[in-house]
Image (tube, rainbow, N blue to C red):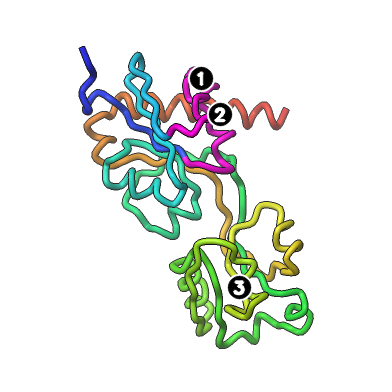
Amino acid sequence: MEPTNNDVIAIALPKGRLLTPILELFEGIGFPCVKVFSDSRRLIYEDRDRQLRFLILRPADIPTYVERGAADMGIAGKDQLLEQRRDVYEPLDLRFGACRLVVAEPAELHKQDDPHSWSNLRVATKYPNLAEAYFSRKGIQAEIIKLTGSLELAPLVGLAERIIDLVETGQTLKENGLVEVEEIVKSTARLIVNRASLKTKYRRVQDLVEKMRAQVEAHTAGARA
């Protein structure tokens, strides 16, 4: 008998830098089938035996898919969750994909700049809500320019004096002549769950959550040893 939609658990996974540790996580809990995404362009895979459906999406789209029930579960960066403020359940910090959201500016500007004297700024970012909240807390008037990529270019061509962007090592900033000024928030990958699915598919969802939790704890303990 074919599984119904109510039987299947749909899990949204992000393209990009988080995919490799996610595939390792799922392999660790006994789902090596997700490796199909590592060397192909397919966007969906169904494991009929386990009644699982995996979706590969743009990272920024995953909170929407989960909130609206197109996916029962998903993995998203904390930065996206804070920016989008979607109504989803967040049961687990997966403790990988660590990065930081920072304010950065050109090195030449940094030599004479004092963040305590900021009053009116033009800032380019992919995170307008977090940027606005950050400057509002500081009482700073800021014009927020939303971009979707190549933020490092904005100060170089005069579109904005500063940027707010996600960094891991900061190397990309350095290569483009930018200097980190202040950190706004730290981010790691988080497991998120649709609130209705948590009720209607509770046992299966909770089983997956606990398997991932045990794998994360085991990996953390191994790293400390």
Residue that appears at 48% across and 34% down? 41
Q: Which mark is residue 67?
A: none
Mark 1 surroundings: few (<14), some (14-19) or many (≥20) residues within 10 A: few
Q: Which of the 4 image quarters holds residue 74?
A: top left
Q: Is residue 185 above or below residue 196?
A: below
Residue 120 location (% of width, % of height)? 55, 87
Residue 57 location (% of width, % of height)? 43, 42
Residue 93 location (% of width, % of height)? 50, 41
Secondary-structure class at tag 1: helix
Q: Nearer the viewer, residue 41 or 54?
A: 41
Q: Is residue 118 above or below residue 92?
A: below
Residue at numbered disc 3: 154
- Left or right side of 57 for 6: left
Q: Earlier in the sequence, mark 3 or mark 2?
A: 2
Q: Which mark is residue 39?
A: 2
Disc 1/disc 2 C-alpha distance (Å): 13 Å
Residue type at the position of mark 1: Pro
Residue type at the position of mark 2: Asp
Which contiguous range is marked in magenta? 14-42
Residue type at the position of mark 3: Ala
Disc 3/disc 2 C-alpha distance (Å): 34 Å
Residue at numbered disc 1: 32
Residue that appears at 50% across and 48% down? 77
